[in-house]
Image: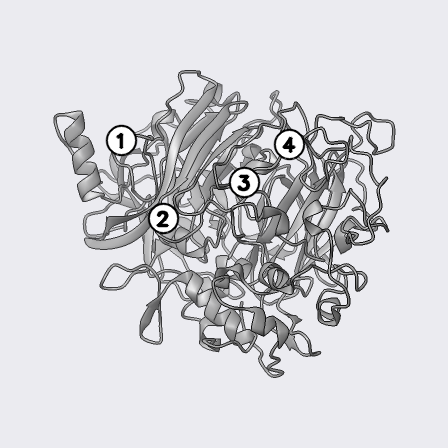
Amino acid sequence: MIRCLAAFAFVILTIALLCSPAKAQIVPITDVNPDPNIVEAYLTADEKDVTIGGATVHAMVYKDCAPAGVCAPGAGTIPGPQIKVKVGDLLIIHFKNDLASDSASIHWHGIELDNDSDGTAVTQDAVLPGQSYVYRFKFFRPGVFWYHSHFLPGQPTFAGMYGPIIIANNIEASLQGTTLPSAANTHTLVLSDIEFDGTGKVGKQFMGVTKTINELVEICHNDAFGLPGGSRAACMAPPNLPGDTVLVNGVKPDPGTNTPKFIVPSGQRIRLQLVNAAITRHFRLSMLNSGDNKLYRIGGEGGLLDKIQLDGGTKGTWNTLYNEGEVTMGSGERSDVIVVPSGPEGSIVQLVGNALPSPFLASTGLPANYPLVFFQIAGTSTDTSPNAGDSILNGTAEDIENIKDDPFVPLQDPAPFGGSSNETIRITNVRPNPPGPDLIMLPSIDGFSSMLDTNGGNGSLPGVMRPPTARYARVGDTLELEVRNETMAVHPFHLHGFSMQPVAMKMNDGTLLYTFDYDEFIDSQDVYGNQTFVFRVRLDDRQKICDTGGAPGPVTGPCAPAASGGAIGRWLFHCHIFHHAGLGMMSELVALEGDADGDGVVNSLDNCPNTPNADQADADSDGVGDVCDNCPATANANQADWDGDGIGDACDPPENKDQCKNDQWMNFIFPRVFKNQGDCVASVVPVAQNLFLPNRIQRRDVASFVAKPKSTGRRKVRSD
């Protein structure tokens, strides 16, 4: 572990800023609020040189820096500072984007928060360079989480812009030292990878040149659509393979010096709270050279489990493709485990990674037993060994709720905005190539690619289009949904805003493989090729706390703090392999106003006027668009029918009024969005940028492409 030491605080700060070592030890965030139930801090997105394996790397980081420019010791490292909170705490983060040219945000991965804080292109304006944004939300579920940007996030995340979040169970302190290891024997490990050239530029080699992840996605997309600068090679390996340098808390593991290293007694229970922040890599984890090489899973994405689980092996007839006692984490996934390093005095036990078999295509060529963490044995512990089935929360007040047996309701049918009411979400590799009948083999949902990973900022949020693959439900609904993988590769499916409870795994032909025999809440799940993941999700409401932007942006809509209504809004779901999502394997689950008064009817009496709705025109001129607005009283012949109620009126988003007519091409491409020739936008260019062309090429003149789309007719590009 590299340390910058000095006698005085200002010297510590100076050294930290100058040498910027990528530390093995996580740095806690600086809380400037004295209230024990509020964590308030400052995070700045910035470019920063860090040292990795002796090389200087031009990284992108979240810095812990106050407004006056005073940064905490260690600010600007990989990963960003750890945020550690309790259930019920309020988080206030003052975010500033100091990147040279990239828009940014903070997405709080896995957190059930109010909608305007989710940090995505469907919940907020992009924070452009020089702009600031304040996130405010509370925590409602314990677990291991992380944060990263969600605006063209491939390159920033690959270059180091991420950090961990730990939310403890309420009774966790009472379990430490007995059921759980002590706080001193609990460690956060952020696992990731990176790749850089001899100049320190982060990216992947492509035709002899280092290209950023976002550049590679654009090149792949351009090839698929026959645009200039495209190349099919950008859609395939090696550009889409994991980075060649593994990082653990920002440090390159070194078997020569056995770093990063923990010194532990033999047989000591050690708790590891694991985050996979890699954009492509699956981490297949096991212990090496220990008397017990198993990882005992005690929790992860939804807090502690009822009982200790051993992952891997064959569950029912479902072959997980890795060994029992190992843990595998796809991109964005987390796990909370106990390991028990044991051996002779002075010996070295390792946490290692390994390759996975097909269909984990991107992680099949990894080396055997590549080192991650070293444990040096010193002394002997009296800890007893854990066993699968040992109780953790079982029988306590925090026993995990089972929603698998609860009644569930269907999605909204018909779906608003031309969306889908199909409970099966299809992971596909085919999407249309307008205006001809030919298809392109690129990542998609239900055969449609949605570019929902950025917007233009400065008030452009309302113009982010709604894909025909979006699902709609009411706040308070319990749903049973399926994710059907129709490709050959494994895809880590991630849902924003709500936690899933796994129900079953089955083959796509309906053959049941495994029924989950324990309760857990998660936000990400690997779905294997030709298999279907079945889950329940309850759209729990939560408190509404308003974020704030700046001038000229990010622009924030009308907002009134309220005890409810925070769950209403657009929530993305997507494959968490970053280039798959960036190429269109993304859609959304939209939570609509619920029946708050329980009268069986969703109407203007529900939560009126306490629940603002970003898609509601302010018909009663009270300064907020909400369910009190008298819709659909005023019809407008020039207003597109965006809410699908059969009339263009004040209920439809005002930014879409005065729609253009008779655009045959738009009706051909988006027949489920534009239900008739009047339901189109005044300019087809924003639609092409938001739904079909990646927003990453907004600076290009795409009008000529929109006017004269080019069909290649023969392009088939492998993406998984």
Nearer to us in this view, 17 or 292: 17
Kindly identify which residue carries mark 2. 99
The percent position of residue 439, horizontal first and vertical second, equals 65, 75
Against 434, residue 52 (above or below) is: above
| Helix, strand or loop for disc 2 | loop
Q: Does residue 580 appear to the left or right of 512 in the view shown?
A: left
Q: Which residue: 58% across, 78% down?
A: 716
Q: The residue under label 2 is which amino acid type?
A: Leu
The nearer-to-camera label among 2 and 4 is 2
Kindly identify which residue carries mark 4. 566
Look at the image and tell me in which quarter the N terminus lies. top left
Against 117, residue 481 (above or below) is: below
Nearer to us in this view, 574 or 340: 574
Question: Where on the picture, by quarter, is residue 441?
Answer: bottom right
Q: The residue under label 1 is which amino acid type?
A: Val
Mark positioned earlier in the residue sequence (1 or 4)? 1
Give the spatial CA distance, label 3 vs label 2. Answer: 19 Å
Q: Is residue 295 visible to us here?
A: no
Q: Is residue 488 visible to us here?
A: yes
Mark positioned earlier in the residue sequence (4 or 3)? 3
Circle 3 residues within 10 Å: few <14, some 14–19, many ≥20: many
Mark positioned earlier in the residue sequence (2 or 1)? 1
Kindly identify which residue carries mark 1. 70
Give the spatial CA distance, label 4 vs label 3. Answer: 18 Å
Q: Which residue: 53% across, 50% down?
A: 312
Against 592, residue 245 (above or below) is: below
The answer to whether the residue labelled 2 contacts the one labelled 1, judged by CB atoms less than 8 Å apart, is no
> Residue 555, which numbered label?
3
